[in-house]
Image (spheres, helix red, strand yellow):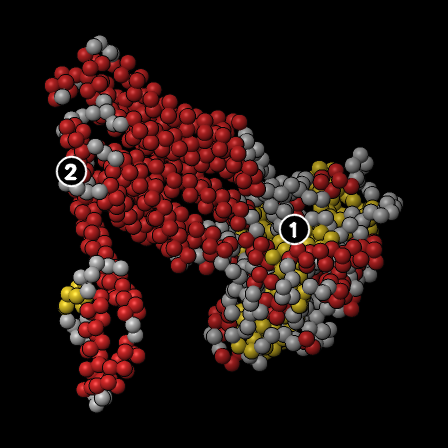
Amino acid sequence: MKPPMWRRYHLFWGKDIPMDLEREFQFHLEMRTREFIDSGWEPEAARREAQRRFGDIQAFGKECQLIDDRVESTARRTEYWSHMKNDIACSLRQIRRSPAFTIVTVLTLAIAIGANATIFSLLHGVVIQPLPYVEPNRVMALWEAVPEQFRVSAANYLDWREKNDVFEEMAIFGSSSMNLTGEGQPEDLQGVRVSASYFPVLGIQPILGRWIAPDEDAPGGPAVVLIDEALWRSRFGADPGIVGRSIRLSDRPHTVIGVMPSGLYPSWPSTPGSIRFGSEHHRYWTPIAMSSQLRSNRHSHVFGAIGRLRKAVSRERAQSSMDTIAQALAEAYPRTNRGEGILVKPLAAELVGEVQNGLVILQVSVGFVLLIACGNVTSLAIARLSSRRREIAVRTALGAARGRLVRQFLVEGVVLATIGGVVGLIGARFALLALTVFAPSDFPRMNEVHIGSATVLLTFIACGLTCALFALIPALQASRANPHDAMQDAGRTTTAGSSRQRIRQFLVVGQVGIAAMLIIGSALLIASFQNLRNVDPGFDPERLMTLGLSLPSASYSNPARISGFADELLAKANALPSVESAALAYDHPLEGNWVDIFSIVNRPTEPGRDSPSGYFKIVSDGYFKTAGVLLVRGRLFDSFDNRTAKGVVIINQAFADRFLSGEDPVGQSLDIRTPRAIWGSAVPDRFEIVGIVRNTRFLGMRQDPAPAFYVPFGQCPNGAFTVLVKGRQDPEPIVPAIRSLVWSIDPNQPISETLSMDTIIDRDLARPRFNMFLMTVFGMVALILSSVGIYGLLAYLVSQRKQEIGIRVALGAGTNDIFTMVIGQGLKLALTGLLLGLAGALAMTGLLQKLLFGVSPRDPAIFAAAAGFLGMVILLASAIPALRATRVDPGITLKGE
């Protein structure tokens, strides 16, 4: 209860009447009774009704207490915000009075916060943000494990779909390529063959039309197609009447049944067990319409598979169920499925792949940069505290409480951190625009990266943590200041307190340690990238151009027609004066898409062992000369290796080492059944090894060469191939001439993407280069900030110790003595930080293992080189204030004191 005399503001009558609780209760009761009497009630009845409605004195007292609490709370809030406005105004005045401190602080924070916002936007847009599917966490990718992650055969997929009880639906898909003709210039399109369940698994609705119906996904079904939104807009002018219209694909009419929105679709399952999601790979979708022969095929692993989990089914349970199915299939079909498993992985993991690991490492790196920035700003704030000792002393002498001083410094920190955060967000926006330009072309979901609400929230959190780190320490030190000592020392140059020095020294040691970790990480990535650049691809990419062609099966169903087109094109291309040589291949030299099984004639397969397999590569005669692949032994293909000749094959060195080690491969024969199954009985199923060629890194520069065997294009004429042209000079001007040659043979035949092999290699190295570039930038920023921290600490100590230095000089200390004293203090801190950084790098560089090539994450030479470089920079940063210390004039210094 309050004291008996209160001053209340009456809620109804607005009267201000001093009285105790009982008198106030009676006053309100009488006023309420008078209201009832005025409205026509009898006096006694009015009093009883007022008593009933108004309650007793205890309830009235509780109500009065609540009113008092609200009034006091409002008064406290008003007082708090009044003080806060004063603190903000005072902070802004302090900022204006110290422009140098403000600029350095804001820029330091902006760089660190902007870097964090940039990388987090990348991480959020690529990894954290859910895929644009219905309940994307239930969509899984399915692979065969043979034993590595591998594509799926049609027959195995059908068994999975029938026997599993953990997926609502499964779908299968494969790559496709067709020519769009009949309207405008011919265009080569890459697309996807899909089962009817493909879109229901993903849950993406069409913009126009419908999905593929089950009856359309059957042999002999109607030729229907869905097209991508980008193709609909660019080729058909976003015509809303496109549904039901017929378009000509590979010389066959197809009815458009729908338009799918642009987005992320699993499109091309590659041989090494990965999925391509790029928009250039899904310009259209057609039914897969598996034939009876394909439905029983367990040898050809050419498809990708996806599935939607049933509700409440975890990935772990699904994996366990599919393991049981894999075991049953291995027992039922030991020749094809022995030792093969099934992998169930989130589809999102297939999209981000190794990018996720790199982005997480970069996010950790920029987090370290933010810590270094906080250390620098904290050190600056502590140094600035000395110049404000008199101000703090006056405030304390005038009655400012410790909490009031702490709040003032925290408000200043909040203002500076907020300004730095805003500037950092602006910088992050421009940085993202730059990254969009310089990021690898296959970087996933780059078009979805932006400064969103999550990034803004992270920035505010970073600003709050930054404020807590760099403002709280000087605030607490300021609040402990003795006003008497401060007033006495005002205007004198004194050595800072030992606790303050220890804090700044600790911050510098931490900065150097973190910088050492980042510099070592950068050095490892630089060394790794250099190793990649120096890798011999096994062929000569110089002046080599690639052009893609896909002959329509409707017009080129006869292998003889394909061979005739290829022979005429090569004859005309080789006749061009600017062409050194030309050839055809199913893949270009840095690509491998076809794996097939074989057997070595007169060598029985061991019981219980799978048939060996290798990369099946179709090339024309002249391929090895054009691509610069050297012959190791035997001979190369020539024009006589055609469909009328006996089967011949050339193997690479990896094939010979793995399957024919210790033997003479030339003259032995391989039994390869696929060519006859595809091209008919005119093609032999036995191929004599006539040569061995050098290994090429057709799986990418990071992958070791795999076993491969080459068959002649004349014996296996495939309608989809790549034209390789070796120019006498720059081959790019040759492309229009090759295009004209193609159209002179078939005016409806388009050419797909044309790229030089140098560009293809550059694309293959784009992601390692991107990671190296960003890590190096952050490492250099960390190095600069830590060097500034060392420089700032030593410069501050020199300014504080001028009297001591003057006395030392007056007593006979030489220039070398002063220089050694100052620089020794800096190097001592740097060495401590460097040792901690080396220990941290040894503990954490294992995270870089997946990003490195040809270099150990604990390479001692790289550690030593990075440490030496960091030490030299810090030595330079320490030498500047040390030289200043040697120029201190003892006469002027002591006279001033």
For residue 152, side relative to residue 591 (left or right): right
Looking at the picture, tell me which residue is in the foreground, 831 or 50: 50
For residue 639, side relative to residue 700 (left or right): right
User: What is the crowding at mark 2: few (fewer than 14 residues within 10 Å), some, or many (at least 20)?
Assistant: some
Q: Earlier in the sequence, mark 1 or mark 2?
A: 1
Cα distance, mark 1 to mark 2? 75 Å
Q: Quadrant of the C terminus?
A: top left
Judged from the image, the secondary structure of the residue bearing numbered disc 2 is helix
User: Considering only vertical position in the picture, is 807 above or below 263?
Assistant: above
Give the residue displayed 24% in from the left and 37% down from the top: 478
Residue 892: x, y in percent?
A: 13, 19
* Three-letter code for the amino acid on which mark 2 is drawn: Ala
Give the residue displayed 19% in from the left and 64% down from the top: 20
Q: Nearer the viewer, mark 1 or mark 2?
A: 2
Res. 379 in view: yes
Looking at the picture, tell me which residue is in the foreground, 126 or 483: 483
Residue 111: x, y in percent?
A: 34, 44
How many marks are shown on the rendered structure? Answer: 2
Q: Quadrant of the N terminus?
A: bottom left
User: Considering only vertical position in the picture, is 342 above or below 368?
Assistant: below
Looking at the picture, tell me which residue is in the foreground, 289 or 189: 289
| Disc ID at residue 272 | 1
Judged from the image, the secondary structure of the residue bearing numbered disc 1 is loop
Dividing the picture into quadrants, the one containing residue 796 is top left
Residue tagged 2: 397
* Three-letter code for the amino acid on which mark 1 is drawn: Pro
Judged from this view, the residue extending furthest toward the top is 812
